[in-house]
Image: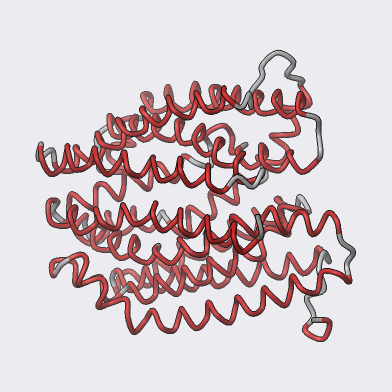
Amino acid sequence: MSFLKKSSVYLISNILNASIPFILLPILTRYLTTSEYGKIAIFQTIITGLVSVIAFNTLGATARVFFDKKDEHYLKNYNGACFCLLILSLAIIIPLTFIFSTGLVFFTGIDRNWILAAIFISGINFVVQFRLNQWQITEKAISFGLLQIGQSLLLFIFTLIFVVFLARHAEGRIEAQMYSMMIIFVITILLIQKDKLLSFRNIKKGMFLDALSFSVPLIPHVFGMYLISSVDRFFINSKLGSDQAGIYMVAMQLSMGMVIVFDAVNKAFMPWLFKELSNSSFIQRKHIVSKTYYYFILLIFIGILSFLISPYVLTLIAGEKYKAGKLVIGWLCLGQVFLGMYLMVTNYLFYAKKTGQLSVLTIACGVFNVILLLCLIAPLGIEGVAISFAVSMLLRFLGTWFLAYKTKLVPWTLGNV
């Protein structure tokens, strides 16, 4: 399957997968108060934060080792080692949650049971993402799409049952996620067994060390991303209230519609790029750079256009009670554009195994985002938070591009293109 066809399959899959939450959005915004939506936003933010610690962030290692051309027996046991790290991480996180539950409930403003549900969902999500990643690196885009869409359909059905028909409000949305993830977990385990992707019979110490050496330096990177794109909900919730957090989250969800396309392109681009870098010389890689620059120009145009269109889209989909989000959605869309550009350059650092440098940069941008956010939230409210997000995403893209340039994997200079 060609790069264009694979991109199209991923794009169609992403559109179908993301269209389900978009269909749900006007339903949720009408059945939930802005405050309830804000609490759900905090719940989702906790799940996002857990990504950096669940299985010690070794999901990326299970994908990267595939390109080291190890034999099938080694890969199965390497995957098994990462699953052992998943169990170990849960054995650490769950007791800590009970020990510090009082402080966590006070800080987040949500019930302890919700926090435990977030841990449970995060653990299952690792297993599901592992199955999806294995299909991605072996370029089985259709299988990838079917599981992804099936997961969203289950969540859609259970959300309608618990939120609309049973009127369980915010709790219903959490319960819908729990039940849908339990079902998808069983399906995923059966699919993993079918393809014999795991083995625990001959796990070596070196496998743990290799996975951790790749992934642990990325934990600050993931945490830095969390500081840029997720931690703002906590500040909005504590300083402006859960109502404003709900409005901001709705605008953020709509802006992430752009990420559907960017993610689809990147899913096809990453394995293609790794193959090109493995099988071509430096001078033969000019075409990679030229395509990247054309893509950048397209994304900049989309970012400018989003300021004009997105405010009307927000009011149409979410309703009048979320109209305050019109102040922020343009900035959020611009930030997502910089994310799309970032995805085109970060793969070079993963290929070169320069994850430590990426972590330092992302942490720096994350800290900058928090500082700028705190400076702007008082005078500008949620608009200041959105501006901080866009500026931080721009800095992360530019910094990552500079690090990619330093790897000297492709001729970035325009004269060579």
Residue 274, horizontal then vertical, whole percent: 75, 54
Q: In which quarter of the image is the C terminus?
A: bottom right
The foreground one among 307 and 392 is: 307
Residue 124, horizontal then vertical, whole percent: 45, 31
Q: Quadrant of the N terminus?
A: bottom right
Q: In this view, does 22 lie above or below 313?
A: above
The foreground one among 152 and 235 is: 152
Residue 147, horizontal then vertical, whole percent: 45, 40
Decide if residue 89 is on the left or right side of residue 158. right
Decide if residue 218 is on the left or right side of residue 9. right
What number of labels is visible?
Answer: 0
Query: Quarter of the image holding residue 400?
Result: bottom right
The foreground one among 315 and 375 is: 315
Q: How is the image coloured?
A: secondary structure
The foreground one among 377 and 262 is: 262
Residue 362, horizontal then vertical, whole percent: 59, 58
Task: Please give the name of the residue rendered at 71% of the width and 52% of the height, measured from the top-left corner.
Answer: 350
Furthest residue toward top: 201
Task: Please give the name of the residue rendered at 18% of the width and 67% of the height, measured from the top-left corner.
Answer: 322
Q: Is residue 323 above or below residue 138?
A: below
